[in-house]
Image: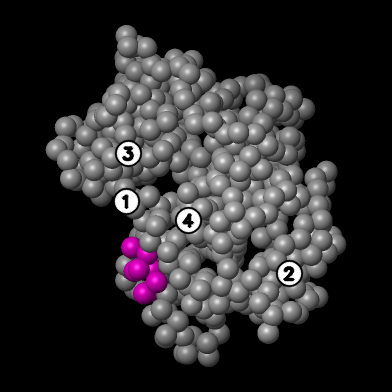
Amino acid sequence: MTDTVLDISNITKSFPGIRALDDVSLTLRRGEVLTLAGENGAGKSTLLGILGGALAPDSGSVTVDGIRRTEHSPRRALAEGVMIAHQEPAVIPQLTVEENLLLGKTAAERRTATSAVEGALADVAVMGFPLDRRAQLSRLSPAQRHALTIAKAFAFGPKIVALDEPTTSMLEHNVAAVLERVRRLAADRGAGVIFVSHKMPEVMAVSDRVVVLRDGRVGFESAIADTVADEIVRNMVGRELLSFKRLHPVPPDAPVLFTATGVGHPGSPVTNDISVRAGEIVGIAGLVGSGRTEFLRALVRADHGCRGTVTIDGKIARFRDPHGSRDAGIAFIPEDRKRQGLALQMPAHANMALTAAPELVGRGPFINVSRQIAVADEIAASLALKPATVRLRARQYSGGNQQKLVIAKWLRRGSRVFLFDEPTKGVDVGGRAEIYGLVDQLAAAGNAVVVSSDLPEIISLSDRVLVMRAGRFVSEHTGEDINEHDLVASAMGVVKETA
């Protein structure tokens, strides 16, 4: 039996006007963790689509365990033992944990799946996310769903497992346990693992080898022991990546632009207050499940029963739903871009018009599509959208470029308050720097900006940081107090509360 479990040879794939993959070849060994790195738009998602059978290559071959694939379909890939754990977990919220683990199995397979289900639940617990098999998926956090998706991918004896941004919703203290479990599962079960992540510490910690895609080609390959993170990044983006520093910190005499008092989410008796000055970026830090997303959703009345008083420029803004918050001057960039931020079947230019900015929809009952495209092209150029066309459907863009579309639709709206929930989730290292610069520019223009994200992002961007625990702000940090140690300690409740 050969040690190679996967051989991808000379794969080429094109879409209208785009060559997504150009003569790509790579191999994967049993028990190996291979990181597939590259900027958004480099071709990673297309290659995973071909591996999982959702796409057929224009030319080239896929060979699994010595057998060349002749039929390109998800059913065939599953029969070969290929499992893809997508960046957005493929789950049914109305079903339980156990029912989701058994999705796609026949009645006979379900009757013999007891040990597989028990093993998956044990793996999730080791990762730090113990779950009740009877719990409904709709009640789980994004991090818990990702952990369950990883465990399910390994549960039924796969030969190849592809993990696409598996820790994207997890904070640092969970990630180490997840990565260790992935390495252990690969080694113990002899599965080859393709790992996709934009977080260099994760890549260096979990990988045996790295392959970098750039513009649809293999641009770099190395054993992880023979390279360093900076070399990987240089080969991804073609330049040195510098740590982000804000160019426009908030002036000390800036007036308060945005306040919200008594903000509460339905089902919780807890309320919070926040104020943001013109030109200020306020970060919200906290562990998974701390309530950060719920707080931002309450600010825009995203759920029935949210409460609180919002003031913009000294005037009370009265609204009952996100449409009202939009009209009041609040832009909300949600965590779940596919379900809450985009209409995936619509073209990019139409998505940019979803906020009804006058330049994009025109006047009267008719839409001037050519004008909409022209304005959208201008916005896309400012964001370095890839591919650099706004005529493709939103679903045809990579995750990071989809996030740029979510942000783009607010840029001509005239909003004064910008709320970012995980603004660079699933965005590559080069794209993150671009979005950081955009957030800085929005603040420099005199807007109020709130960012909820992971700690490195919060530390890089924020003038001031509020730490949330159990749905409540527990501390406030400025200056040198904005550091990883103090923020984590406050989030975990091991320092004196100051808020």
Secondary structure of the residue carrying numbered label 4: helix
Instruction: Looking at the picture, tell me which residue is in the foreground, 213 or 3.
Output: 3
Q: Which mark is residue 484?
A: 3
User: Percent x, y for residue 196?
Assistant: 57, 55
User: Percent x, y for residue 153?
Assistant: 52, 71
Residue 211 in view: yes
Q: Which residues are magenta?
A: 121-128
Q: Which residue is mark 2?
A: 7
Q: Nearer the viewer, mark 4 or mark 3?
A: 4
In contact (CB < 8 Å): disc 4 and disc 3? no
Q: Earlier in the sequence, mark 4 or mark 2?
A: 2
Q: Residue at x 77, y 27 (%)?
A: 370
Q: Nearer the viewer, mark 1 or mark 2?
A: 2
Q: Real-space Cα distance between discs 2 and 3?
A: 42 Å
Q: Which mark is residue 289?
A: 1
Quadrant in the rendering for residue 293? top left
Q: Real-space Cα distance between discs 4 and 3?
A: 20 Å
Q: Real-space Cα distance between discs 1 and 2?
A: 40 Å
What's under tag 4, amino acid-wise? Ala
Q: Real-space Cα distance between discs 4 and 1?
A: 25 Å
